[in-house]
């Protein structure tokens, strides 16, 4: 099963079509003959890394109307302005009803993949991985995280149930780093790693002393990160987070951290510009 086969994705498509089309596409109903047949091309209006192509067929299948879909590129393909991504044909009414949802999702996911690819390229030839966060658009997490992978990045937790990451508020609620790690170690299955958010070297030492497997080094400068990595000396996986952008990511990777998590991959990726052009058969 792929991400596009998930029941949540089908539910998302159906809800989005209901939101957009409602009881019917009024403009199309009053201007276009119901028997009219048409073709359509989805084209790139700029350079991009494509993600979400299988959604075209799934959207068309959910919408009905017998639209035929020809995908011309695969996800992960780097396209240029004017490149044709897909051709569709069928009822003009059906094509017009799916146009906006297809473009909305492809533009959003391709934007995530494109931005991710830029971050991955920025740290090329280092040992560092670029990973996403849980800062995703509600309802789009599985698709956005797929787009991160398509752009060459890696996924952090899918959700709160997928791993143990003890952050600042957990530490406060548990009464400190040591008590939090000890409680997690006692309760969690042996297959889980325990990661702790650290903002200072004293917190790094406390987490290491408690037996943390990974340390999230939060909002540290490159100089602080380099010192922390040297001090940790392989005793835990190191993750840098906070204030990461395309101008700083290479310097952060050069500190020797294992992972850089970037919330912007999913919460701030600019949508890729695509359009769908209709022609009559």
Image (spheres, rainbow, N blue to C red):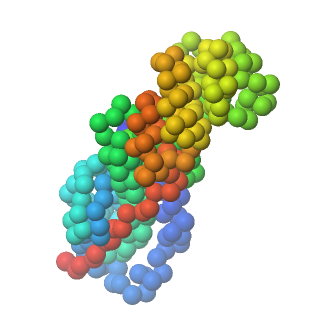
* Count of numbered circles on the image: 0
Residue at x-position 44% and y-position 34%: 255
Residue 251: image x %, image y %?
Answer: 43, 42
Residue at x-position 30% and y-position 59%: 48
Q: Is residue 229 above or below residue 94?
A: above
Q: Is residue 71 above or below residue 3?
A: below
Q: Is residue 265 visible?
A: no
Residue 16: image x %, image y %?
Answer: 51, 61
> The N terminus appears in which quarter of the rendering?
top left
> The C terminus appears in which quarter of the rendering?
bottom left
Residue 262: image x %, image y %?
Answer: 49, 45
Q: Is residue 22 left or right of residue 94?
A: right
Residue at x-position 62% and y-position 24%: 204
Q: Is residue 26 left or right of residue 168?
A: left
* Pick the front one: 48 or 107: 48
Q: Is residue 175 above or below residue 86?
A: above
* Pick the front one: 69 or 108: 108
Q: Is residue 139 above or below residue 226?
A: below
Q: Is residue 166 visible?
A: yes
Quarter of image, res 42: bottom left
Quarter of image, res 82: bottom left
Residue 4: image x %, image y %?
Answer: 39, 45
Residue at x-position 42% and y-position 63%: 271
Q: Is residue 258 left or right of residue 193?
A: left
Quarter of image, res 212: top right
């Amino acid at each position: 099963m792929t991400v596009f086969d998930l029941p949540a994705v089908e539910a998302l498509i159906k809800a989005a079509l209901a939101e957009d089309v409602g009881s019917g596409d009024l403009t199309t109903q009053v201007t276009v003959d119901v028997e009219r047949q048409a073709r359509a091309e989805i084209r790139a209006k700029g350079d991009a890394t494509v993600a979400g192509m299988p959604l075209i067929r799934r959207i068309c299948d959910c919408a009905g109307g017998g639209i035929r879909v020809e995908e011309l590129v695969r996800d992960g393909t780097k396209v240029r302005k004017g490149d044709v991504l897909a051709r569709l044909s069928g009822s003009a009414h059906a094509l017009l009803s799916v146009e906006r949802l297809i473009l909305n999702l492809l533009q959003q996911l391709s934007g995530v993949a494109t931005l991710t690819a830029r971050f991955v390229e920025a740290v090329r030839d280092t040992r560092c991985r670029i990973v996403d966060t849980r800062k995703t658009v509600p309802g789009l997490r599985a698709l956005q995280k797929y787009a991160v992978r398509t752009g060459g990045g890696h996924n952090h937790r899918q959700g709160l149930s997928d791993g143990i990451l003890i952050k600042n508020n957990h530490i406060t609620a548990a009464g400190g780093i040591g008590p939090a790690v000890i409680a997690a170690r006692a309760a969690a299955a042996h297959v889980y790693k325990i990661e702790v958010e650290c903002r200072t070297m004293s917190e790094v030492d406390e987490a290491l002393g408690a037996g943390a497997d990974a340390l999230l080094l939060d909002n540290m400068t490159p100089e602080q990160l380099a010192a922390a990595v040297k001090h940790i000396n392989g005793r835990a996986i190191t993750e840098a987070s906070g204030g990461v952008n395309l101008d700083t990511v290479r310097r952060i990777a050069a500190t020797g951290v294992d992972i850089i998590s970037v919330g912007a991959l999913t919460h701030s990726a600019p949508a890729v510009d695509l359009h769908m052009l209709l022609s009559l058969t």
